[in-house]
Amino acid sequence: MGTLQIRLHISLASLAMFLLKAWRSTAFGVYGYLNFTKPGFAEHAKKFKSEEMEARIEGKNCIVTGANSGLGYATAEGLASRGANVYMICRNKERGEAALSLIKSTTGNPNVHLEVCDLSSVNEIKSFASRFSSKDLPLHVLVNNAGLLEHKRITTPEGLESNFAVNVLGTFAMTELMLPLLEKAAPDARVITVSSGGMYTSPLTTDLEYSDANFDGVEQYARNKRVQVALTEKWAEVHKERGIGFYSMHPGWAETPGVARSLPGFSKSLSEKLRTKEEGADTIIWLALQPKDKLVSGAFYFDRAQAPKHLMFAATGGSHSHIDSIVGKLRSLSGLA
């Protein structure tokens, strides 16, 4: 009888988890189709104020990671066109140089620079941070855009699951190492982290490298993006007296090389509905330009407005209590304890 009760309990728990995951995916799909697509952008844009994007930011130093294509390229170009000194962080030197040349020619801004760094490597991030810090420049805007979605488990040379290495540990290490330079730009400094609506399907979990033998790259990506939102909250809380604003955002469903490569079925089925890279980057640039008293540090933004961090009945809200434990793990793994 006891064994039967245990099996029944396990079966009911498994069923409940299955139904919860199904609800999260369904709610995300419906909410996303109505809001994250190109028609969603067009609808939301009716409330946009054009003057909010007209600010000039000459002399301000901006770092954009993953800047050679997609959202990162559109962000770097958008900031450069408004006069910023832009530092493009790219993994591939050749593709980075091509993007750099194009942005300089299209914007007429000579103050755009390439920095080669693999965001999956903490050692490379530390080397970049050392080089960049030697310039002793105030950093006004850090855009954590670089992202990765690998469907199969791939381990980096440093022994880390690759999605986690780029999306979470890379974002954490870059931000932590740039804090002294961001503080030099206070009170105008800000960190903008490009998350994803996929995070709506996942609670925050301390299983950072997906220990399950049946690796699911899409679920791992969603988990990573949830961590980014919770990290942004934590940074905003810890550094609220340092004059640095921290914001996470969701670009919507945009047509980028990364999406086409990582989610070809999704990209093909919604090809007419996907946003352009410029529409996806719109809120990133908007966050970089707004007076900070109009923004809420720690908030999650979508289409130039604060957005909810959790979908109704998705049971993800309480999970953010794990963030202190996660930060401890990230400090240990990055050697930034």
Image: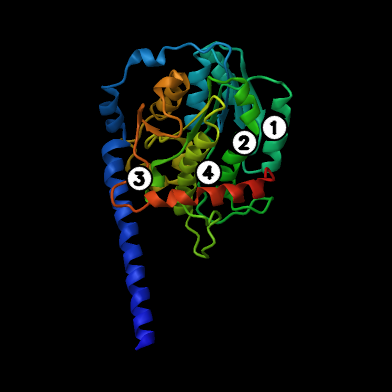
* Quarter of the rendering occupied by the C terminus: top right
- Mark nearer the viewer, 1 or 3: 3
Dot 2, crowdedness within 10 Å: few (<14), some or many (≥20)?
some
Spatial distance from mark 1 to mark 4, Cα to Cα?
20 Å
Spatial distance from mark 2 to mark 3, Cα to Cα?
26 Å
- Mark nearer the viewer, 2 or 4: 2
Dot 4, crowdedness within 10 Å: few (<14), some or many (≥20)?
many
Label 1, on which residue?
Answer: 128
- Mark nearer the viewer, 1 or 4: 1
Label 4, on which residue?
Answer: 148
Any part of residue 278 in sight = no
Label 3, on which residue?
Answer: 310
Any part of residue 15 in sight = yes
Earlier residue among tags 2 and 3: 2
Secondary structure, mark 1, is helix
Residue 176 circle label: 2
Dot 1, crowdedness within 10 Å: few (<14), some or many (≥20)?
some
Residue 75 locus on image (x, y percent): 49, 25
Q: Are marks 2 and 3 in contact (CB under 8 Å)?
A: no
Q: Identify the residue shown where x is 51% and y is 41%.
A: 231
Q: Nearer the viewer, residue 298 or 127?
A: 298
Residue type, mark 1 in image: Phe
Residue 20 locus on image (x, y percent): 32, 59
Figure check: 314 above or below 104: below
Q: Are marks 1 and 2 in contact (CB under 8 Å)?
A: no
Earlier residue among tags 1 and 3: 1
